[in-house]
Image: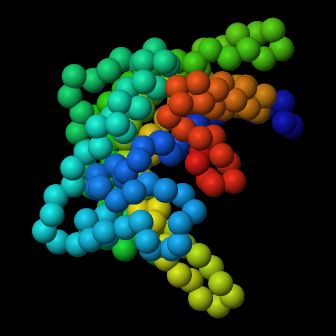
Amino acid sequence: MLNDYEVIIGSEVHAQLLTESKIFYYCKNIYGKEANTQTCPLCLGMPGPLPVLNKKAVDFALKVGLATGCKIAPFSRFARKNYYYPDLPKSYKISQYDEPLCYDGEITIKVKERENKIGITRIHLEEDAEKSIHNNDETLIDFNQCSVPLIEIVSEPNIRSPEEAYAYLIKLKQVLEYLEIYDCNMEKGSL
């Protein structure tokens, strides 16, 4: 019965960028600090001040776009992505979607001596949400993670096996490591 199905996989990967500050604010981007010590009224979504884009985050996203053969958009736009999560008190993230920074690239993988080009639909920037910490019967929120810069790398659905999915993710990780824009530390949830 399994032979009646064809595997078709697309991937959405978030990678944290190694910038000194957050994507839209001047708070430090340092992992592992005491909860709620790397935040400010801006990244908490308090009314009044406007976000200012981190140039280094844009440079890092462009590096990944160029390394994956993407076209670079002459114009891109950020918007509020509205949804409710318990660890997203402002009820939105600032993200790109329909007008991303990079689009139409590819990564070539090799599985069992067969090459396959995995298309990259888009690479866009966005801010991360806060972090929920569950302790017994209570949940606390750590805002240090709020607005950590992310790139989201969205592939075309042309991965045809679990082995190809693995090869694609390994190759993508290698690109990010080589460009020195990401620490590749899975224990910290960086990818």
Quarter of the image with the C terminus in it? top right
Which colour assignment does the render follow? rainbow
Towards the viewer: 191 or 107 = 191
Q: Picture coordinates of residue 37 (x, y %)?
A: 43, 71
Work out whether residue 142 or residue 89 is closer to the camera in this orientation and state it: 142
Residue drawn 29% across and 52% down?
24
Give the side of residue 33 with respect to residue 90, left or right.
Answer: right
- Location of residue 62 in the rendering, given as x and y in whole percent from the top left corner: 37, 26
Q: Is residue 157 visible from the viewing direction of this image?
A: no
Question: From what the image shows, is residue 65 above or below residue 133?
Answer: above
Residue 31 falls in which quadrant of the image?
Answer: bottom right
Residue at (50, 45) in percent of width and height: 16
Q: Position of residue 54 (x, y in %)?
A: 29, 43
- Is there any visible trace of residue 63 in the rendered image? yes
Position of residue 90 relative to residue 113, above or below, is below
Q: Is residue 139 above or below residue 18?
A: below
Position of 159 relative to 113 (above/below): below
Furthest-right residue in this view: 1
Location of the N terminus by quadrant is top right
Measuring from the top left, give residue 107's x and y in whole percent: 58, 18
List the single residue furthest toward the bottom. Answer: 137
The mark total stands at 0
Q: Going by the image, does 190 lie left or right of 124?
A: right
User: Residue at the spot x=48%, y=42% of the render?
Assistant: 18
Q: Which quadrant holds residue 9?
A: top right
